[in-house]
Image: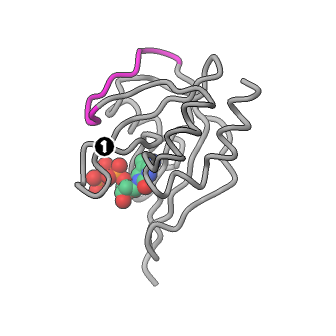
Amino acid sequence: MTARRVVVAGAIVADRRLLLAQRSYPPEVAGMWELPGGKAEPGESRESALRRELREELGVEVTVGAALKESVALRHDLVLVALRAHIEDGTPRAVEHRAVRWVDADELRRLHAEGSLVPADTAWVPELLADLAKR
Ligand code: 523
């Protein structure tokens, strides 16, 4: 059996806004918005992988909290999970992305409705809206 690789994404909510990043590749999803993250290396914990990816992609240091409930099978050997994260240091900037932005609940609903979220990430919209309503 092929080992399952994990892609970790960060759900960063602050002041009732969620951080989204706009993909620059591949062409099918370029221009769409996602929770930033990337593949965990073999042997790397999800938490360490997310801290590394957000450092590389956004230039921020984060602490990592609880996972969102939904996970998404991207392929038979690749699963996508989201972990809540909190920025401890730095201001997010688009190092590998086209842009980053903070969205409130209405903007998240609108991006979802117009099909501007990366397809896999739409699984998290209900949980993200719940988080946005309380934090
Ligand atoms: N997703 C996805 N949503 C999401 C992320 C971070 C990733 O659907 N929020 C998918 C996109 C790719 C796969 O997960 O199919 C790997 O994500 P990527 O390309 O951001 O991770 P990297 O940079 O670790 O992978 P390589 O480009 O292959 O190095």
Q: Is residue 97 found inside the magenta-colored segment of the image?
A: yes
134 sits to left or right of 56: right
Name which quarter of the figure residue 21 lies in: top left
Return the x and y of residue 54 as percentages of the image width and height.
Answer: 41, 33
Magenta range: 88-98
Front residue of 7 and 48: 7
Near-viewer residue (62 or 133): 133
Task: Give the SS element for disc 1.
Answer: loop
Instruction: State whether residue 124 is above or below residue 22.
Output: below
Report the coloring of the rendering.
one colour
User: Residue 98 location, x and y as percent?
Assistant: 27, 34
Is residue 39 shown in magenta?
no
Rendered view: 49 above or below 59: below
* Foreground residue among 21 and 67: 21
Q: Residue furthest right?
A: 134
Q: Is residue 59 visible?
A: yes
Quadrant for the C terminus, please. Answer: top right
Horizontal and vertical percent for residue 43? 45, 56
Magenta segment main secondary structure: loop
- Quadrant housing residue 134: top right
Q: Which residue is rendered at x = 54% and y = 31% of the image?
A: 107
59 left or right, relative to 119? left
Three-letter code, disc 1: Gly
**Which residue is under mark 1?**
31
Residue visible at 68% across and 47% down in the picture: 126
Q: For residue 56, which quarter of the picture?
A: top left
Decide if residue 39 is in sight here.
Answer: no
Crowding at mark 1 (Cα within 10 Å: few <14, some 14-19, many 20+): some
- Asked if residue 37 lies left or right of residue 95, the reply is right
Spot occupied by residue 113 in the image (x, y as percentages of width and height)? 54, 47
Query: Toward the viewer: 97 or 59?
Result: 97
